[in-house]
Every structure is written in structure tokens, then in C-alpha cells.
Image (cartoon, rainbow, N blue to C red):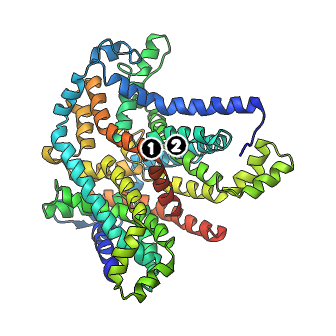
Amino acid sequence: MRLVESRATLTITYLVLGIGLFTALFPIALLVLNSLKSAQEIVTNPLALPAAIRWDNFARAWKDARFSTSFVNSATLTGLTILLVCTTGSASAYVLARKKIKSWKLVTFYLLATTTAPIQLFLFPLYFGFAKLGLINNVFAVSLVYTAIYSPFAIMLLRTYFLAVPREIEEAALIDGASSWQIFTRVMLPIVSPGIVTVALIIGLYSWNEFLIATTFLQKKDSLTAVVSFFLLSGQYSSDWGEIMAAALIIVLPIVILFVFLQRRFIEGMAGGSVKG
Amino acid sequence: MWLYLAPTLVINVVIILIPALLTIGLAFFQWDGLSAPVFVGLGNFVSLWNDSVFWTALENNLIWTAIFLTIPIAMGLLAASMLLIVPRRGSTIFQVVYFLPVIIATAITARVWQGMIYSPVTGIFGWLGKLGLPLTNPLSQTSTALFGIATVDLWHWWGFLCVIFFAALRQVPQEQIEAARIEGASFWQMMRYVLLPGIRSTIVLMMVMTVIWSFLVFDFVYILTQGGPAFSSEVLSTLAYRKAFYDLNVGQAAATALVISLFGLVATYFYIRIQQREGV
């Protein structure tokens, strides 16, 4: 589709889009550039290329932010959350998409309502309750919190995938004598598996990046997530911005690589879930 | 079939519904999180009403809402409509880059802006200062702190809106665009009379979501200024957090949380009404 023929309009278009490109990339470029420089060089000129590439920034960041522990915590938390959201969410989405219970409207409304609830509405009693039960600094407990918060979004997204499956497929399986559980696990789940992958990616991104709950519920040195240990490193433990940017890059890089390869799934997932949800 | 729903519902009720109900109850008590709660009736709400920081926070939330209802939506719409003009491959590259900030953790985005852009020592502002431009760190001034934070969130956020609007624009029926073109509409006339009305429901939806999100904003304020200097960038969510975990005044924190929820509820009500009216 060509909407515009005029050369002037086309030039302005590329100019504006180019400014957008620069704006989006400039802070990221500073992050990458300065992660390779010494603290002194950054003070002299944050825009200059590094005189010598300081790979040791990464080694120090890894040690000071205790990434060997916090990366494991983040990975565990993210993995557990993905597992919980995908298993509980796909079962719920199936029931709600096929209206298999009478009160599906009420359940859908309840789940929708919890997506707009502010975290502060349930954070304080939850924190003190968890504290009483000894669940603070417990990664598994936090993954349950993430599951509660993210699964309504996942259910709304998965629902659209279940809705797209023709009813005849289910009916055929029913005639062949499959139980409801068999229909769900052997017939429906394989068909909607692309949707589950998308949900896993989005929920993984959210859990990996999450800050408020992680910083509240995981406070002991050994239970911090990567993002929270980065936050503490950059707040108190280091004023070496080369090291801080190296730490930032270590957390961001895996996500960005995944995103560049699977960008369509990320974008469609995040957009789809929030527009239709 | 309820068994399929049970895990979701049990987790959701235990983590969200029950604590939310407890929060409503706690709003009427004075509690430090340790000793026995003391019933104070509407006392917490009265002290909020008399607390100037509460009013500053509320005002900041409203300013935040006004900023995010206009700037990122306009930026997103502008960029999305321009993406329609460029070839398909080009538009994909632009989209991916615009979306990149969205996937970077808030804690990291905040620190990059703080250290590499705003800082008078290590950032671009300091470097420009050496060139003779008198720039101060916006986060350290009471008059600019909130806008300094909003700028960071704008950078982080607008690409998401652009991508959503672009997806909606591409779903406007081709026949309408063809018809307008045959009648000789210019690009801007096409935007004004065909494309923008075609994505009206998406725009309205994003505006309502913006209002809801504006009252939830926490990470950037907490990391960049902690609500300072002198509470000038405080918002309701950071105020509630401070009251609960720093002042150990859980009752007032719960009352503040209820005020946030109230705004969310009003926005959700309009969201549902708009959906019904537009028949989305």
C-alpha cells in the first residue's frame, strides 16, 4: 500500500521516524558504551569511545552484584512463574473460552477486576501474612504472588487461542470416546501451544524484570533477584558507573537477544493481552 | 470443570482477594505491623485529609495522568501513522527498535537515565554543562523532579503505544482507504477522516488504561527520587509504601491504597461503559 507519492512528505516521514529511532537507542547506546569504560573516563566524557576496552568491569559487576546467586534466584523465580502460569492459566482459559461453566461471566469479570487492582491494595496484609508464615525470602512464595498477578493477563490471551480452535475437533474426539481431560491435554493443548509459548515469553519477561514485589519480599542477600541486586549495587555499593552499566548489560543482554529473534511473539503477546484483556 | 479453574482461583483468592479485603479492614485501624491493631474508625482518612504530602501526591498523580494522556499517545499516533507510509520491512525495523525500551527492566532504565543522562558528574547533562549549557539535574530540584521522572517513563513507554496503534491502523478496512484515495484524499485527510476514526476504540481504550496505569506508577519514582526532594515527586503508591514499611503506619498505608483503588475503579467503570457503548 502506497499512501504517499510526494517526495517532501516521505522525507519528513523518515526524519521523524529517525528522530524516534535515535531517541530510543541513545540511552541504550550510552549503556553499552560506558559499560566498557573506566569510571574516570566516564567522568571526562560519557560520549567518547573507550581508550581501552575494560572487560574487567563485567567481572567486578558479576562479583559485586553477587550475580552467581541472584541469577539463579531470578531464573528459578522466572521458571517457576512460567510453569505455574502456563499450567493453571491454560486450564482456566480453556474453561472460560468454551463457557463450560454457568458462571463463566462472573469468573471472567473477577479476573479482569484483579488486573486493574493496584498492588498496594493487597501488598501490606500479604507481606505481614507471609512474614508470620516465614515465607519472606522464599522464591517459591514469590512465584505464587507473580502467578496471581500475571495469570489473568495470560488467561485473556490464551482464551483467544482457544476460541480460534474449531469446535468440530473437540466433538470428533468426544465421539471417539476421549474423556474431557484427554481432550484438553491431548487435543487442545497441542493446538494452542504457540499461544502458550507466547505467554511463557511475556510472563518470563515480566518476572525477570519485576521490581516492587521482588524488593519487598526478597531481602536477604542470598535470596535477591538479579534486578534487585543491581538496584542495591547501583544505590549503595558502587559509584563506579562503568561497573554499574556492565551489571545492567549483563541483565539486559539475554532479554534483548531473545527479543530480537522472537520480536513478533513479544509484541503480539504484550499488545494482544492488554488490548483484548 | 471447576477443577480446571480451581488452581487459578485458589491462588488468586489467597494472594489478592483475601489480602485486599484485609486492607479494607486495616484502613480503619492503627497498626504498626507488630502489636495489636487499634480501631480508629475514619481516623486514618482524617489524617490523610490533613496531610499536605497526601495532597501533593494526589496532585502529582493527576499531573502524571495529564502528561501520559497527551504526550505518549500523540507520539505513538504520529509514529504509527508514519509507519504506514514506509515500506513493510522498514516499518518492522522501526517498530522493533521503538519497542526495545519497553522490554528493559524499570530498575535498569531508571539507573541509566540517572547516571548516564541526568548526572552532573557522569551524565550527558554534566558533559553539556562543560560545553557551557547550564543544565542541572532535574531530579534534584523540587520544581522539576516529577517531570524528570516522567521523561524516563515516557522514553520507556511510548513505543508500546506506537506498536499498538500501528497494529490497529493496519486493521482499518482496505476498502475504506481505497475509497478515500479514489476521491483524492491527501495523507492527512486520510488520517483525519478515515484512519483515526477507524481506530477510535483503540485510542479510547489506551486512554482509559493510561488513567489506570497513572495511578499505579511506582518503580520509577521509588528508584529515581524516593518521592523527593521534599516530597515534590511523591505519588500515592510511593506514599502508601513509605507509610507501611518506613513509618510502620500500616493503617494509613491501607487507607492510601484504598484511595488509589478508588481512582482505578472509576476508570474501570468508564472503561466498561465505553466498551458497551462502542460495542467492542
Cβ–Cβ under 8 Å for marks 2 and 1: yes
Structural distance between the alpha carbons of marks 2 and 1: 7 Å
Which residue matches tag 1?
Answer: B102
Q: Which residue: 23% across, 66% down?
A: B38
Identified by mark 1, the residue type is Val
The answer to whether one can see residue B104 in this image is yes
Which is more toward the observer, B234 or A87? Answer: A87
Q: Which percent across, then down, holds residue A252?
A: 34, 38
Q: Which residue: 29% across, 71% down?
A: B18
Which residue matches tag 2?
Answer: B159
Is the residue marked by circle 1 packed among few (<14), some (14-19), or many (20+) residues within 10 Å?
some
Identified by mark 2, the residue type is Gly
Which chain contains the residue that carries disc 1? B
- Give the answer, above or below, for where B26 lies relative to B57: below
Q: Which residue: 38% across, 68% down?
A: A190
Which secondary structure, mark 1? helix
Q: Which percent across, then down, holds residue B74?
A: 62, 43
Q: Quadrant of the N terminus of chain B?
A: bottom left
Q: Which mark is residue B128?
A: none
Which is more toward the observer, B46 or A53? Answer: A53
- Give the answer, above or below, for where A62 lies relative to B3: above
Which is more toward the observer, B139 or B163? Answer: B163
Which secondary structure, mark 2? helix
Q: Quadrant of the C terminus of chain B?
A: bottom right
Task: Mark 2 or mark 1: name the one nearer the start of the chain.
Answer: 1
- In the picture as drawn, the residue positioned furthest to the front comes out as A176
Q: Which percent across, then down, holds residue A173?
A: 41, 83
Which chain contains the residue that carries disc 2? B
Residue B72 located left or right of residue B127: right
Q: Please tell me how many numbered marks the rendered image carries.
A: 2
